Amino acid sequence: MIEIERKFLVSSDAYRVVASKTSNIRQGYLNSDPERSVRIRLRDQTGFITVKGKSNASGLSRFEWEKEISKSDAEALLNLCEDHEIRKIRYHVSVGHHIFEVDEFLGANKGLVIAEVELRSEAEKFSKPDWLGQEVTGDISYYNSKLSQTPFCDWK
C-alpha cells in the first residue's frame, strides 16, 4: 500500500469550472509524527481513519493504509485530535488519464490551494493543466499534518 503522488500549488481558479465533483472535508490528527501519522477524516457523510508512513527521499512515495469508519465514529475521534482541525473543499478534476484533487483550504489555512495527482510509478508522465503552479512535492510544510500544527495563516 504505497501512495505515489505529486503536489502543486494552484495558480488560478480555472479548475472549478471543469471539476466533476466536490466534497467537504474535515480532518484531524491523532498523531502527526513525521515517521507515522494517524488521520481522522470526515468527507461529506463518510468517515475514514488513515495511517501514513514517512516519505521516501524524493517525497513522492510513502506507505498509506485507510479504512472507512462510521460518521459517528469519525466525529467522536475528531474530538480527540490535536489542535487545528483541517477544513477544505476538494474538487475532482479529470486531466488526461488522471484525476487531480484540488483542495481549497478554509479556516486557519484559508488562501492555500493545493493540487495532488496520484501516480502508478514515480516516473509516470501526466498532463499539467494551465492552472497548475509551483511543485511542492516533498516539502513537508504543505503536508496536511504539518498544516494542522503550523497553519497557513501563521506563515511569514
Image (cartoon, rainbow, N blue to C red):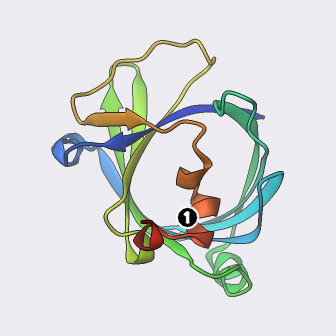
Badge 1 density bin: few <14, some 14–19, many ≥20, Cα 10 Å:
some
Viewer-nearest residue: 90 or 70: 90
Assign the C terminus to one quadrant of the image: bottom left
The residue indicated by pointer 1 is 147
Under circle 1, the secondary element is helix
Up-down: is 51 above or below 150?
above
Question: Residue 80 sits in which quadrant?
Answer: bottom right
Residue at far right of view: 35
Look at 40% across and 19% down and name the residue there.
97
Q: Where is residue 118? Give x, y as percent.
A: 54, 31
Q: Where is residue 102? Give x, y as percent.
A: 37, 47
Q: Does residue 89 appear to the left or right of 151 in the view shown?
A: left
Look at 37% across and 35% down and name the residue there.
134
Viewer-nearest residue: 111 or 14: 111
Assign the N terminus to one quadrant of the image: top right
Look at 42% across and 17% down and name the residue there.
126
Q: Amino acid at mark 1?
A: Leu
Up-down: is 73 above or below 137?
below
Q: Where is residue 153? Give x, y as percent.
A: 41, 72
Residue at far front of view: 156
Q: How many marks?
A: 1
Look at 23% across and 42% down and name the residue there.
15
Q: Where is residue 112? Give x, y as percent.
A: 36, 59
Up-down: is 92 above or below 25?
above
Question: Residue 23 sits in which quadrant?
Answer: bottom left
